[in-house]
């Protein structure tokens, strides 16, 4: 099979761009911007080489891969848990917990109400529940709605939450979406679906009390090319992306008044199961073999997601929590080639922990009839990951309303075996079969957010299950906010969108790594902690010295660009380019003329591969640091320049 090369992969080359200065920062040469050209007969959008010609891949010279493969599999890509997170809840032996003698008097409830409220404001939701179980007075304080409003707000960035709709209180709202508040909190999620993947933004819509996630898309507003006057073999690809959410088709939608939440209250107040009764059965509670099993915890169970009440849609989606993999398992998986033992996120993306991904590549050791093992799902809050989740989706052949009603009543529909496909039985009225069964007949295909059957029938009768077609499990992981939040020392950190020509627009994570990050140290400082500045040069003015000191602080360390969405050549989760050193060791030139006037040019390594991520290699390229919000990549071997722009994720967090 021929290998296909795309411009998402960097270009080889040894000479710097013709419009840049020499490798010395004090000498320069000039160039012009070039004249825009159209796409007339004989015009090619490529420069020296056609990036779509797969036969050219073996001819491209490669560069060293040190630090691009082995280092990406190291422990340096594991992040520490942030101090402001309480997922997963840490639990310890009872003998290690502080205790009080029965004779000791607890004076905390006797404090003024203002002080009690202030102390409780520092507690997590789990701790507030524990406090409310101590005494009636503290229960009243712990149920104060302003405390729970603050907890909800802490998980909803970008907008001020003022309404608990559709719940009566913020405490009820928090409980309704617990333990899934981490979804809008971390907002950015990318998945392992196929080689292209998908990037979604999860937010909270207080108008509907709904946690929703939509795919982030980008497209070219216009496509133009221009020759570089300094080098007629180099073409500049103009890039004006339009980034938006695909609001017509939600990927994730969790409602406060969901089936799960109503079933909690319905089943808890319903009839009790006799000893030995296996309990309710549903597709999410049954093994693939069909044998009945004990009910699972709400952390292990799947949650149906009705996507915008599309009752005519035959596509179904269930939300699933994930469980972190042991570090020993992760280390073992990283020694494997792509896809690295099916861990997500992949090694190139720093993460606090990783989970098992089983949607694209299956473990041969695993049962072919099962998508995930039982140990891949959490059984309690302490085992739950707040950095990953899964969505199981499938298409299901629709059952007739008559079949649904008979199944809900626990009866056998003898007419189902007859050839009467042309006759669609009328839906029985609510008065004829009971309100719960009537609701089931009307809403089972749309995954209604209320119980499908009465408590007694639900507990005694398995739900009707159609034929699943195209079933898959997609694993999503988030990005630690520190990775995409720019700082004074690391101004290029962030989520970016890049031009990949024939592949369209793709999203990247650009992360900056300084040498002291690996050891947890600090930049070069004196004994008093003051950052050491470079020595002043003879004849250097104060302004020149301050500018050089600022550049020495910013232009240092390594810059990594990792694909959040990919293509058939270089998939999601892989490096697309890496600049080993933004400082003097990687410095090439400073551009003197338009359209890149003043841009610093550093050496970089680009990732290229054939279709299916075959024969991947790194080739030489050059990175143009135009501004903190715009970069350009010079693909020397192919002879073209493409652009990358920063994406402002926060502007998508407020529903219109």
Image (spheres, rainbow, N blue to C red):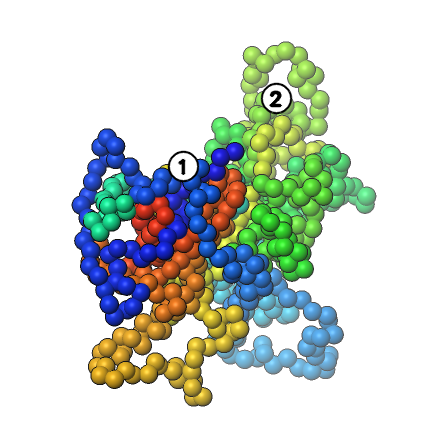
Horizontal side of residue 656 vs 196, given as left or right: left
The secondary element bearing badge 1 is classed as loop
Residue 443 spot, x, y in % from top left:
54, 31
Residue at x 43% of width, y 63% of height: 580
From the viewer's side, name the closer residue of 182 and 582. 582
From the viewer's side, name the closer residue of 500 and 10. 10
Note whether residue 420 is visible. Answer: yes
Residue at x 39% of width, y 81% of height: 531
The first of marks 2 and 1 along the sequence is: 1
**For mark 1, what is the residue?**
53
Q: Are marks 2 and 1 in contact (CB under 8 Å)?
A: no
Q: In the picture, residue 129 is in which quadrant?
A: bottom right
Is 617 situated above or below 403? below
Horizontal side of residue 96 vs 193, given as left or right: right
Q: Residues within 10 Å of mark 1 (few under 14, many from 20)?
A: few
Find residue 402 and name its label. Answer: 2
The secondary element bearing badge 2 is classed as helix
From the viewer's side, name the closer residue of 133 and 311. 311
């Amino acid at each position: 099979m021929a290998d296909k090369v795309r411009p998402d992969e960097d270009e080889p080359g040894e000479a710097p761009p013709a419009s840049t200065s020499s490798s010395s920062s004090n000498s320069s040469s000039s160039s012009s911007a070039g004249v825009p050209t159209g796409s007339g007969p004989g015009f090619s959008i490529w420069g020296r080489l056609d990036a779509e010609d797969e036969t050219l891949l073996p001819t491209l010279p490669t560069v060293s891969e040190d630090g691009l493969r082995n280092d990406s599999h190291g422990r340096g890509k594991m992040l520490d848990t942030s101090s402001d997170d309480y997922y997963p809840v840490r639990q310890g032996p009872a003998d290690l917990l502080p205790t009080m003698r029965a004779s000791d008097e607890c004076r905390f409830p006797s404090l003024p109400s203002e002080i009690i409220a202030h102390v409780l404001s520092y507690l997590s939701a789990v701790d507030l529940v524990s406090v409310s179980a101590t005494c009636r007075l503290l229960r009243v304080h712990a149920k104060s709605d302003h405390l729970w409003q603050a907890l909800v707000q802490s998980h909803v960035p970008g907008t001020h939450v003022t309404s608990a709709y559709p719940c009566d209180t913020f405490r009820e709202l928090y409980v309704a979406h617990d333990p899934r508040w981490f979804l809008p909190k971390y907002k950015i999620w990318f998945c392992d679906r196929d080689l292209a993947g998908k990037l979604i933004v999860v937010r909270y819509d207080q108008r509907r009390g709904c946690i929703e996630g939509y795919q982030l898309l980008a497209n070219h507003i216009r496509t133009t090319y221009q020759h570089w006057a300094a080098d007629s073999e180099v073409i500049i690809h103009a890039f004006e992306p339009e980034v938006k959410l695909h609001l017509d088709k939600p990927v994730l939608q969790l409602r406060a008044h969901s089936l799960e939440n109503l079933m909690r209250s319905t089943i808890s107040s319903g009839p009790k199961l006799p000893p030995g009764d296996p309990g309710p059965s549903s597709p999410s509670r049954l093994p693939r073999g069909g044998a009945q099993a004990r009910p699972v915890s709400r952390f292990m169970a799947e949650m149906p997601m009705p996507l915008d009440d599309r009752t005519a849609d035959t596509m179904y989606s269930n939300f699933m929590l994930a469980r972190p993999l042991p570090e020993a398992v992760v280390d073992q998986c990283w020694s494997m080639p792509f896809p690295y033992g099916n861990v997500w996120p992949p090694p190139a993306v720093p993460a606090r922990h990783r989970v098992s991904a089983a949607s694209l590549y299956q473990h041969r050791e695993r049962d072919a009839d099962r998508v995930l093992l039982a140990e891949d799902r959490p059984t309690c809050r302490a085992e739950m990951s707040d950095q990953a989740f899964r969505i199981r989706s499938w298409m299901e052949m629709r059952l007739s309303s008559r079949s649904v009603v008979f199944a809900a009543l626990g009866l056998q529909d003898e007419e189902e075996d007859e050839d009467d496909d042309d006759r669609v039985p009328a839906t029985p009225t609510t008065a004829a079969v009971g309100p719960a069964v009537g609701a089931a007949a009307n809403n089972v295909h749309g995954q209604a957010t209320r119980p499908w059957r009465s408590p007694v029938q639900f507990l005694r009768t398995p739900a009707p299950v159609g034929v699943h077609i195209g079933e898959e499990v997609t694993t999503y992981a988030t990005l630690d906010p520190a990775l995409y939040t720019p700082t004074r020392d690391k101004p290029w950190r962030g989520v970016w969108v890049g031009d990949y020509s024939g592949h369209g627009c793709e999203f990247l994570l650009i992360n900056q790594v300084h040498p002291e990050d690996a050891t947890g140290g600090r930049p070069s400082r004196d004994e008093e902690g003051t950052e050491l500045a470079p020595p002043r040069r003879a004849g250097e003015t104060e302004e020149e010295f301050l500018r050089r000191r600022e550049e020495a602080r910013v232009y240092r360390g390594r810059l990594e660009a990792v694909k959040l969405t990919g293509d058939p050549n270089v998939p999601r989760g892989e490096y697309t380019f890496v600049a080993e050193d933004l400082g003097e060791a990687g410095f090439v030139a400073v551009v003197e003329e338009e359209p890149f006037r003043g841009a610093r040019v550093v050496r970089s390594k680009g990732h290229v591969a054939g279709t299916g991520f075959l024969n991947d290699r790194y080739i030489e390229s050059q990175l143009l640091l135009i501004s903190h919000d715009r970069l350009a990549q010079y693909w020397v071997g192919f002879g073209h320049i493409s652009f990358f722009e920063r994406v402002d994720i926060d502007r998508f967090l407020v529903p219109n």
